[in-house]
Amino acid sequence: MSPDLELRERLAGVDAAIAEAAREAGRDGSQLTRIVVTKFHSAGFVRQLAELGVRDVGENRHQEASVKAAELTGLGLNWHFVGQLQSNKAKAVRRYARAVHSVDRDSVAAALAAFPGAEEPLDVFLELNLTGDPGRGGIDPDALEPLAERVLSTPGLVLRGVMAVAPLGEEPRRAFARVRAASDSLRLLAPDAVAISAGMSGDFREAILEGATHLRIGTAITGKRPVAG
C-alpha cells in the first residue's frame, strides 16, 4: 500500500514547522529527532511511514508495539517506547526497543539491564513529573540525581537525558523551561546526557525553543487515531 497524499502532506507540514521552530531558536533542525507516535495504528500504516522516510517510531503499549516490531523487521526502524513501563514488561520491551523514554523507578532501570542476547545498549530517558501529582508517572525533578546514578551504574543502559509531558493548564513553554533546568542539573552528573524528549503535536514548537532534541509527535502526522482494539 502506497502512502496516501494526506499522510504525505501532514508529515511534510510537521517537518516544515519543526525546521521553522529550529531556525527561530537558532538551532540546527537536522539535529532534532522526530519520533512518529503510532498508537492504535496498524503495522501497515507504519510501513507507509517507512516508505516516506520515517525511521523513528514511538509506541506506548508493549502488547501493540511488540506485534508491530515483529511484523516490520527489516525496515530499519528505531522503536522508541514512550509509555509507562512496568518492571515485569521491561525485558520484553528491551528486545525490540532502541530507546525507552519513561524510566521513573529503580526497579524499571534494573529490569532493563543487559541480559544474554541483548546485543546493543539501550538508550534511556528519565521521565519527569511536572504536575506534582504522585499518581502520575515520572519523578519529581528533585529526585533526578539518585535515579540517574542508578541508570549510570546499570550494565547495558546509556543515559541519554530527560523526558516530560507539559501539564494541561500550564503554558507549555514555561513547563519546558523547567525541563531544561532539570536537564542542566543532570548534565552536572552525566555530561553526555544532553537529550531532552519533549514536545508533542500541540506544543513541539515551544519544546524546541526550550531545547528539546527528541519530539514525540502523533496525530499532527498520523491524523485521527483509530478506535482502540
Image: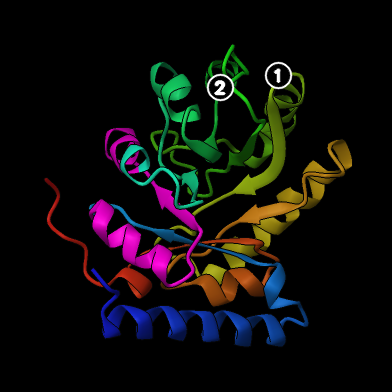
Q: Position of residue 84 (x, y in %)?
A: 41, 36
Q: Which residues are magenta?
A: 42-68
Residue 179 higher or lower than 210, as above or below? above
Asked whether the beta carbons under mark 1 and mark 2 sit within 8 Å of each other, the answer is yes
Magenta residue check for 65: yes
Question: Where does residue 187 sit, x and y in percent of width and height?
Answer: 83, 45
Label 2 CA crowd tier, 10 Å (few <14, some 14–19, many 20+)? many
Locate residue 207: give its quadrant. bottom right
Q: Which residue is mark 1?
A: 154
Residue at mark 2: 112
In the image, residue 66 above or below residue 154: below
The quadrant holding residue 32 is: bottom right
Considering every residue shown, the one lying at the far top of the view is: 116
Distance from disc 1 to disc 2, alpha carbons, whole Å, reads 9 Å
Q: Residue at x 39, y 61 (%)?
A: 168
Q: Determine the residue positioned at 66% across, 55% down.
A: 196
Residue 174: say if magenta.
no
Please give left or right for residue 228 compared with residue 79 in the image.
Answer: left
Amino acid at pointer 2: Leu
**Type of residue at label 1?**
Thr
The residue sitting at 52% across, 22% down in the picture is 108
